[in-house]
Image: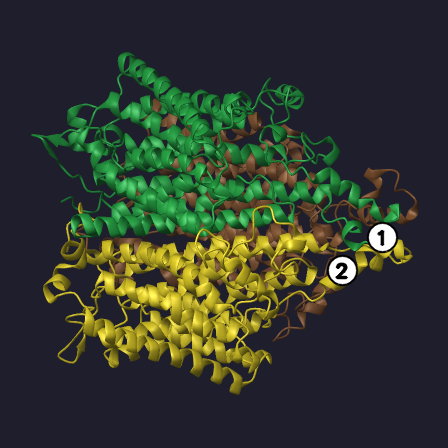
Chain colours: A green, B brown, C yellow
Amino acid sequence: MFEKGQLQMKLNRILPLVAVAALAPSLGLAQDAEAAAPAVSEEVVWIFNSLLFLIGGFLVFFMAAGFAMLEGGLVRSKNVTMQMTKNIALFSLAAIMYWLIGYNLMYPLGDWAIEGYFSGLFPSWGVLEPVGVALADADDPSYASTGSDFIFQLMFCAATASIVSGALAERIKLWPFLIFVMVLTGFIYPLTASWQWGGGWLSEAGFSDFAGSTVVHACGAAAALAGAIVLGPRLGKYKDGKINPMPGSNLALATLGTFILWLGWFGFNGGSQLAMGSAGDVADVSRIFSNTNMAASAGAIAALVLTQVMYGKPDLTMVLNGALAGLVSITAEPLAPSLGLAMIIGAVGGVIVVLTVPLLDKLKIDDVVGAIPVHGFAGIWGTFAVVLTGTSTVGAQVLGMVAIIGATFILSLVFWFILKAVIGIRVSEEAEMNGLDVAELGMEAYPDFTKG
Amino acid sequence: MFEKGQLQMKLNRILPLVAVAALAPSLGLAQDAEAAAPAVSEEVVWIFNSLLFLIGGFLVFFMAAGFAMLEGGLVRSKNVTMQMTKNIALFSLAAIMYWLIGYNLMYPLGDWAIEGYFSGLFPSWGVLEPVGVALADADDPSYASTGSDFIFQLMFCAATASIVSGALAERIKLWPFLIFVMVLTGFIYPLTASWQWGGGWLSEAGFSDFAGSTVVHACGAAAALAGAIVLGPRLGKYKDGKINPMPGSNLALATLGTFILWLGWFGFNGGSQLAMGSAGDVADVSRIFSNTNMAASAGAIAALVLTQVMYGKPDLTMVLNGALAGLVSITAEPLAPSLGLAMIIGAVGGVIVVLTVPLLDKLKIDDVVGAIPVHGFAGIWGTFAVVLTGTSTVGAQVLGMVAIIGATFILSLVFWFILKAVIGIRVSEEAEMNGLDVAELGMEAYPDFTKG
Amino acid sequence: MFEKGQLQMKLNRILPLVAVAALAPSLGLAQDAEAAAPAVSEEVVWIFNSLLFLIGGFLVFFMAAGFAMLEGGLVRSKNVTMQMTKNIALFSLAAIMYWLIGYNLMYPLGDWAIEGYFSGLFPSWGVLEPVGVALADADDPSYASTGSDFIFQLMFCAATASIVSGALAERIKLWPFLIFVMVLTGFIYPLTASWQWGGGWLSEAGFSDFAGSTVVHACGAAAALAGAIVLGPRLGKYKDGKINPMPGSNLALATLGTFILWLGWFGFNGGSQLAMGSAGDVADVSRIFSNTNMAASAGAIAALVLTQVMYGKPDLTMVLNGALAGLVSITAEPLAPSLGLAMIIGAVGGVIVVLTVPLLDKLKIDDVVGAIPVHGFAGIWGTFAVVLTGTSTVGAQVLGMVAIIGATFILSLVFWFILKAVIGIRVSEEAEMNGLDVAELGMEAYPDFTKG
């Protein structure tokens, strides 16, 4: 029906003109240097676009490590092995499920896809172009290689699942969590994402979400929120009307994770330009890099100042989450804002996190790493902030958020209830007290260090 | 005799055609747009190819950090400083030795190399092209810059040495280990690798090893196996017929190391396409990225499921090694397989690790981090798996493995025996009990944390 | 007045020729293939140059994580949370200050900048090109996108501040430190850097500093030295004529930080070629990669051997600092040297660190991580070493160092004294003894691990 490149609607529409320009010398236009010189040939554009996805792909891949380190640093040492296991397993399952089902569910099958669907080892398993494909035979000669698009899109799907693992840490069983991940990455995310990025009804309704403040981040947060509600808080977290802090075991690791996520975000937002084969596109990627970095910085500083003012002491975990909230906030529109606006968007994200982390605690929703404020509340703010640049309307943005967050939340809630009823999702009280590492895995993360 | 670009046999043979096409407008072919437009000029191809090596180079460089973190996490805390010292020193020595001797040993001296051999500060030390070289004066105008090739190839050589350090951890002396590293990276690896990648007899015999399942990984594992045999197991590892587990001190660090290695592998396999200057080449790099990621994911999940089934509990260290085994397995042929086949190849790699780690223990070969199963056994499997894609024959693959693994093992064994006889390779029993950090280096890695 | 691309003086001056060559077919030169084929169009050059900055940008960004991990590993565990807070905050403040003031201070305002100065959200805040800019409308069509230049230059500014945080660790208050960072990144660094990279008087006087051995590293070290003098040593560091070692709490983390810095340095030095759109430029970037890696390796090995010889035991922290000193040393001229010379330059850097770390201690200047020897003394050596390649003269190099180091030191000293007088810069004795984490932030970095 559609070709993916067209659906994503950020296609470099100038390419046919370039092809014509390439013929200019023989058409007698050589006197006009601007018109005569073939600026960038179609094949070079295709290479640059594919390269952007490959670079973006490995940068966003590394965010899986960032999430793992952030979460591993924010859980108690008795649950670190489990958190590592969940993170590497969820990424791996996302990679398999997105290929098996998600990718083709997200992008409606066009001619090329149907063809590919039967050309692999098994029916429906071959999604990549053949070895050494010629440009003319490529799935979309004006976009990028299918393999580069696949690896880039896959990483977004996996990020959605990473968001969930942090919120539900320290009490959820491994296998039910992984089953949920398979459903999320194979079905829920591809479905709701297809409404926007698969050329679906939301993109036609004018919803705008450049790199996924809602499509990825608030979606992951909605799935996490549903899980946190069904799962309940950690033992002793809310007791006698008091909120008991359960400090993370390794803040150096959490800081490393934040820096890695920040690094990966250059690929996340920059790669979402989807094109790098013209001056305008590479300048846009450059704007996106600059704005992304600014929003992260502003989110960190806003959280630093606000925790100093509110609590008399800066709070490192809030600063880290503030930087991440700044990143999530700018993700819906990292291109259009000026650096000044990017700073404001990011700073508001940082403020939101500082204000809403206690709010969740008041509601007795136990989000171990603050994933719901960072990816959900800041994601909602970022999606609204698109309106500030005139790229969309409040109505369209609300529609998109209600649709994606609502659908994800409801589908997730249903599925979490089913999992709870059928196989149970929570470890025993004893296992939770002793730590999931010893109880569930028989393996400590730091066996040489005495526990306090 | 040969030019390196030709020897590596992955050269973009279409380039001369492109050069001709560039002239098409003036040759009256302008009517045919496809024929007329110079798709990619020779210089742009050269830039893209060089850029691929530079990106691949820094990604594979980072694998040195990945190995260090993986090994640092899997040894006991009393040996972490030593493991860090070995890792940074082995990389540094590899960089020096590969330049002094290895690079020119691996690639038979052609005209360009001889010339370069005498143009540096010292005779035989100048391997790079002059500053600001024009394309026409480049060592190989149809390949890539010599500097980019050098940095990329160097990283492969260093990876071989990294494999050894993990297997022999916690009991080998620093300096004998480093002497072995100098021999391995200056002589053994370049020699055996030249048989395949230096245009040698193995490549002519039809052996196929795209990015080095055998040439790099099984070679490193063979050197490690020889060392482990000569060195003997850690004190108390095999006692009274029992295998005593000696758990790693920091599984968060080991997980980080695995993610870093996974990240680096995109460069390792993707860069081994050796070209990115055409649609076909960049699409191939994209296939390689996708297959590499899939194999790693499948290896991790296979190990997760298998340890759950076999032991009733998932084993994180096996999951990490399963991911790495998946990566090693796909390295011999990351291009040709479909995603489905890549998944199977990677999963089998993960299974192999779970099954062979205990096997080595039964043989009382003490491989601290599982390097021999991951890089050796999965490497052998991956080299066989090339046959599944029709790229090679069983005979050619067996020949290549026997030659490279056999030669590396024998040369290493001889050299380890010489080292043992001449200067001794093992620390004293007391040093081993107290930990190499205090005994050999006088410096603890975690002085503030009480040891369990 | 000037266009930035011209000021930086590494512009690919061949571009106009390329533009002419593009017209060659219609000018009757088609018989001569070399002359006829437009090697690289102006737009493709611009894309490659911008891409180099984007890749360099994210690599140098990651150095912020490298500094954080290095410093977090070298301080005692009771000060790790504070060190993490300082590192993420200093980067964020640098990002904001360099945009608000530094960038336009460093590059004298040309037409394009003035225009941009008033086009953002606020007056003077808009420095990037408009969305989807056409090449002809770009700020400098022969250089790279402004956004890519901005993000790359910003990272250098932030690195300068990172150098300071390590030296002053474990006793400086958070907010005075951050105020100094704002002054350094908004004013001092941009001012002194503009003398060289902003087309100022030092560049006209023949001073040569390719990627900033002096402009960035010695500048940061000078600011750190001024701070260390005003701040004084840690309690108990120099007592009864003895130097008390205060070992770092996590050498695995410090090693990781070193590897990350090494990785980032490929972007730091490689990106400073400022161009990648011709064979000569990409070959130069390749040379730079190779030389940078060689110098780091040589620095590590030199420190390894020297500490073995001097103390009878290799010292890991010296090896790490040796690698970094090698990197700093090659930074002033990573392009011109042969690999052999790069090795010597790096090795001397490693030797300098081993010899000067005790020297600072004798002077009772307490530099917690060795930042002043690594970035200052090795930076001075590297700046002198430029003379070895014939790129500059001793006189010009001395002039540049005296100017930049002198100005930075004096301005910093004045500002540190003002800070000390007005708000105080040092935590209380009690806070220092108990650790800054609990005393100042109320948050331990490793709460689960008993302290030794």
Kindly report the distance in space between the C-alpha atoms of the residues bearing marks 2 and 1: 15 Å
Quadrant including the C terminus of chain A: top left
Horizontal side, residue B280 vs residue B121: left or right: right
For the view shown, which residue lies furthest in the bottom direction?
C395
The residue under label 1 is A30
Viewer can see residue B43:
yes
Q: What chain letter is assigned to the residue under label 2?
A: C
Q: Residue at x 43, y 59 (%)?
A: C99
Residue C284 appears in which quarter of the rendering? bottom right
Q: Position of residue B275 (x, y in %)?
A: 67, 47
The dot on residue C18 is 2
Quarter-of-image position of residue B187: bottom right
The residue lying toward the viewer, choosing from B328 and C205, is C205
Residue at horizontal 78 percent and vertical 45 percent from the top: A21
**Three-letter code, disc 1:** Ala
Identify whether A373 is placed above or below C215.
above
Task: Using the image as rendered, state which of residue B84 and residue A91 is in the foreground.
Answer: A91
Give x and y (percent) for residue B239: 26, 41
The 10 Å Cα crowd at callout 1, few under 14, some 14 to 19, many 20 or more, is many
